[in-house]
Image (spheres, rainbow, N blue to C red):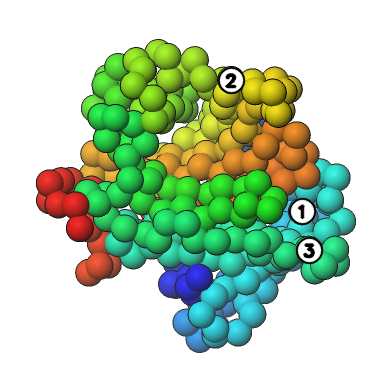
């Protein structure tokens, strides 16, 4: 876990899905409230001024809480759904190799609940990353899992699928087409794109513009074949995802849990997806198109 670098992405205006508690269905575009910001050392802390206590301004009434200049940044977020009374502590991850960042849940203090994350794949360049399909178009560049609580957060990179994204102008792409493009390449089986998509059901898809760039958000289920020990109702994972494009490649953060755990864990994963950002490249950035033959 690493510290956020100074970035406007910490502003609630750049996280419209956080201020709306991440309702992935029938969600309206958020209009940023007036912000009064002050600089404190290396961080920029923004608080939203709201005249009336409404649900949309609930996040704005809580400033981001920085827990010291340590190796990680923890922030308290109000949760939603059945755990609305809870406060969620989150930490940040920044991948300088691929130039992106996101936040993930680490603790529910009032419940004395701690997420048990293990970094199963450390961030690595696209050319050496593990492929998600036989054609190796889509690859996982980082992943962390909580085996006990059946949670997975991963970031994948791959080129757009021209079958779904035919236009060169990404601003004309719809969220559903972006979702279909990513899901068509997401399978370890030697099957066609349509067969891979048959494993998945997109429940919702929408887009938002952040820092002048389009981000596409979607929610979907992935089903698997039933077995004697796992019956059909429990055989799917519930996903939320965010995708952004850079240098001709799609960068996607996926967060998932078992379907039966969605009501409990889903709101936390939605916050993770809403926090996903492509960062300004540093000297450590390795574009996906660079040295595609290199496997180390």
- Residue 280: tell me if it is visible: no
Q: Which residue is denoted by mark 2 in the rendering?
A: 225
Q: Residues within 10 Å of mark 2 (few under 14, many from 20)?
A: few
Viewer-nearest of discs 3 and 1: 3
- The answer to whether 92 appears left or right of 171 in the picture is right
Q: Can you say whether 108 is above or below 270 in the image? A: below
Q: Which residue is denoted by mark 1 in the rendering?
A: 79
| Residue 85 x, y percent position in the rendering | 87, 56
Q: Are marks 2 and 1 in contact (CB under 8 Å)?
A: no
Q: Which residue is drawn at 53% across and 49% down?
A: 153
Q: Which of the two discs, 3 and 1, labels the residue nearer the N terminus?
A: 1
Q: Residue at x 42, y 56 (%)?
A: 121
Q: Can you say whether 97 is above or below 162 in the image? A: below
Viewer-nearest of discs 2 and 3: 2
Q: Residues within 10 Å of mark 1 (few under 14, many from 20)?
A: some
Q: Residue at x 24, y 39 (%)?
A: 248
Q: Which residue is denoted by mark 3 in the rendering?
A: 113
Q: How far is the residue under mark 3 from the one under mark 1?
A: 14 Å
Tell me the element at label 2: loop
Tell me the element at label 1: loop
Q: How far is the residue under mark 2 from the one under mark 1?
A: 33 Å
| Residue 131 x, y percent position in the rendering | 32, 40
Q: In which quarter of the image is the C terminus?
A: bottom left
Q: Can you say whether 205 is above or below 275 in the image? A: above
Q: Nearer the viewer, residue 56 or 103?
A: 103
- The answer to whether 88 appears left or right of 68 in the picture is right
Q: How crowded is mark 3: few (under 14 residues within 10 Å), some or many (20 or more)?
A: few
- Residue 90: tell me if it is visible: yes
| Residue 63 x, y percent position in the rendering | 69, 69
């Amino acid at each position: 876990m690493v510290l956020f670098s100074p970035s406007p992405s910490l502003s609630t205006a750049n996280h419209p899905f956080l201020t709306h508690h991440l309702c992935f269905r029938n969600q309206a575009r958020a209009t940023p409230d007036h912000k009064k910001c002050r600089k404190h050392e290396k961080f920029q802390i923004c608080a939203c001024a709201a005249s009336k206590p409404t649900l949309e301004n609930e996040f704005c009434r809580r400033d981001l809480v920085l827990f010291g200049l340590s190796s990680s940044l923890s922030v308290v977020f109000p949760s939603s759904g059945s755990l609305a009374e809870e406060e969620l502590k989150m930490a940040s991850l920044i991948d300088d190799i691929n130039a992106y960042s996101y936040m993930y849940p680490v603790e529910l203090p009032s419940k004395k609940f701690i997420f048990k994350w293990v970094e199963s794949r450390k961030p690595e360049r696209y050319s050496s990353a593990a492929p998600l399909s036989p054609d190796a178009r889509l690859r996982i560049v980082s992943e962390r899992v909580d085996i006990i609580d059946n949670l997975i957060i991963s970031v994948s990179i791959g080129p757009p699928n021209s079958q779904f994204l035919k236009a060169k102008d990404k601003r004309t792409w719809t969220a559903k087409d972006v979702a279909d493009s990513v899901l068509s390449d997401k399978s370890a089986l030697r099957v066609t794109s349509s067969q891979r998509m048959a494993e998945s059901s997109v429940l919702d898809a929408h887009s938002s513009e952040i820092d002048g760039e389009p981000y596409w958000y979607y929610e979907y289920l992935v089903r698997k074949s039933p077995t004697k020990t796992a019956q059909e109702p429990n055989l799917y994972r519930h996903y939320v995802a965010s995708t952004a494009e850079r240098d001709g490649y799609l960068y996607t953060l996926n967060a998932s849990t078992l379907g039966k755990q969605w009501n409990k864990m889903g709101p936390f994963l939605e916050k993770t997806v809403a926090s996903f950002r492509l960062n300004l490249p540093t000297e450590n950035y390795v574009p996906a198109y660079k040295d595609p033959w290199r496997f180390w």
